[in-house]
Image (cartoon, rainbow, N blue to C red):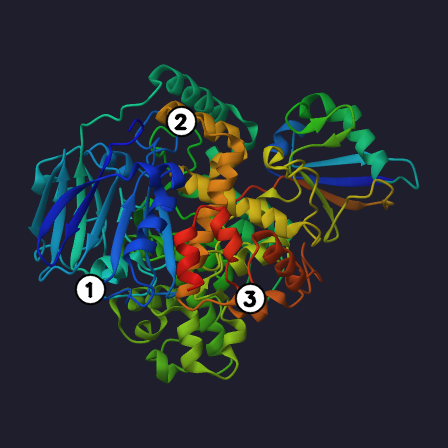
Amino acid sequence: MIVRLRVFGVISTRLGGAKADVELPEGAVLRDLLDAIDARWGATLAPDFWEPGTKRFKGSVLLVSEGMDLMDESSPLADEQQVMVLMPVSGG
Amino acid sequence: MKGYMGKLLRVDLTARQSREEPLDAEAVRDYIGGSGLGVRLAYDEVLPDTDPLGAGAKLIFMTGPVTGTVLGTAGRFQVIYKSPLTGMLCDSSSGGHWGGEFKQTGYDGLILEGVASEPVYLFIHDEEVEIRPAGHLWGMDTFGIQPLLLEEVGEPKGHVLAVGPAGERGVLYSCMVNDAGRAPGRGGNGAVMGSKNVKAIVVRGTRSVELADEGGFRQEALRINKLNATDPRFKDLRELGTPEVMDNSWAVGDIPVKNWSRGSYEEMSVSLGGKKMRDTILVPHVACHYCTIGCSRWVKIDKGPYRMDGPGPEYETLGALGSMCMIDDLEAVSYAAHLCNVYGMDTISCGATIAFAMECYEKGLITTEDTGGIELTWGNKEAMLTVVEQIAFGQGIGKLLGQGTRKVAEQLGHGSMDYAVQVKGLELPMHDPRAYFSWASNYATGPRGGCHLHGMSGFLENRQDPIPEWGLTGYFPRHGDEDKARVTQLAQNWSAILSSMVLCYFATFTLQPSDLASLVNKATGWDLTSEDLSLIGDRIHALYRAYNYRCGIRREDDRLPVRSLVPLAEGGAAGKVPDLERQLREYYELRRWEADGKPSHASLVELGLADVAADLYP
């Protein structure tokens, strides 16, 4: 199955673009996606945005899909699911 | 008194006299400076029943112990006053260079009182004060007046703070503007200054600030400047400014659309975003005083109906005058922001009031008869621009809309208060409590009303261990009410310290309280700890609340507008609503406020506010 990442702001420069597809085994969950991100981009995301030990984003980086924050690492993912990766910063 | 000039300047406009007063050393230790000290001065000098636009009102300008140093973001100032928009105490902060220059004139603060019998401007230069006639300047905008005044006083290196036509006419959300486009935007300080017949304050100073540990401070300041220059989280902010928020925050449902009635709207947000601005109208710009974050924008539009050359709109402005009004034309919104700048108006309240008026028009509460034929429909950018002009000059429907959403709703009735999106009269900023739940208690209890700067609580959510030094450890998911009252409380204390040191709120992204304590200590020679700062933040907040309680603010005023608690149908906050009552209940316990909203006697005494306790519990 394919999970389609849509990446915003400074994180996208670390991932080499605003969009990326991640191939995962059928029945994959969020933990599988994080492992895949670690394998592919962990080195370029760390240390600012990635914790290699826990294989999680750090800071205020959010994973959002279908209007929901993905928090639970056992959350199932679906083929063609879009996952947005962003770090909201604000003010003004 | 290291870190301070040690003096306040008091100007009696009625008598056209000025005098110096020593800075109260004990009060400085208790409140640091800036808004904290300003709130103390206001509490002591401005009676709660004072008419904000009357002769008894005062305008208090304050700097802090690090103002004017090489520390980035330390060129700011705070202005403290009773707000004509809310009827409560208000403080507002501005960047640029005016604040640093003012301190170098030899004063830590300025208190304006009374009313001049004719328009005047003040020229303050190296401990000299001149009150000069300003009849020839009355009516000028806040940009055109700058070079003219600098030439008139013969100080090309000076800095000008001025009100525009909106402040002269008493628009309740008018503001002062300094350094061509920087403004203490909120709460109507422009109207207060205009009511005193003061058009401008020009400052030029060459005095230097003596610090307790010059070398140590410089080393620490340069470390922080470097940290801000290299922190990857600031990369987008530096490149795109706060408009970058438009590019991504729609995904989490944080950007209000159509007067807070609609959820995420990607296309509109991106059309108004930082990338679009960069690719079309952005030109090179300069940062505020020594700032290495460099978020400020400058835009130039060479052709078409919206030709302008001026500061670029901030995120809040793009939301208020753009997505709130369903206008996705970046040039039109930039031009509207420019009009607000030159006329001297808060873009948040102005845009929010126009969006509210558009909804009233849609519902038939405002008609073309009221607007003089203007069709105030959603997305009508020409109507929006015309109304901005009318508000600034008190013409047509602008006379009504210049009073802000609460007062307009009071006059229109028919349930319109439900979608007048304000707290205690101050229009909400462009961050949705349905997207980040802590905004709920933060807006409801904000000392100056609905505000994201007096407690940047939403920015502490979804962040691991936001303020560990103050015990705020863990992770606070944005869509949850657990511990959000505590997030709000500490965020408010954190903001109180920043605004008392008079630093930019972006400093919270890279610094911890101990960093701030270190800066204060090296500047002053004190030995404050991180915990001391927390206590001072609590004290400032309690004093602010006590003043507002005396203005009549009670528990029932700590609320959110109905509209902001209606679930959205779409987007990153769809179906989510914070539990405001739970947050408030917990917040009141943390703050130790009584059921009616009054700080408890014991808490006031413990915070060193026994005199305030005596006032509230006679």
Q: Are marks 2 and 3 on the same chain?
A: yes
Type of residue at label 2? Trp
Residue B485 against residue A36 in the figure, above or below: below
Going 42% across and 33% down the picture, which residue do you hit? B294
Quarter of the rendering containing residue B509: top right
Residue B412 against residue B16 in the figure, above or below: below
Q: State which chain disc 3 sits on.
A: B
Residue B144 against residue B398 in the figure, above or below: above
Q: Quadrant of the N terminus of chain B?
A: top left
- Residue B329: percent from the left, percent from the top? 45, 56
Residue A92 shows in this picture: no
Crowdedness near tag 1: few (<14), some (14–19) or many (≥20) residues, C-alpha within 10 Å: some
- Residue B37: percent from the left, percent from the top? 35, 44
Dot 1 corresponds to which residue?
B55
Dot 3 corresponds to which residue?
B559
Going 75% across and 52% down the picture, which residue do you hit? A66
Q: Which mark is residue B526?
A: 2
Q: Nearer the viewer, mark 1 or mark 2?
A: 2
Report the Cα–Cα distance between label 1 and label 3.
32 Å
Label 2 SS: loop
Type of residue at label 1? Ala
Q: State which chain disc 2 sits on.
A: B
Q: Is residue B257 left or right of residue B573?
A: left
Q: Is residue B566 left or right of residue B373?
A: right
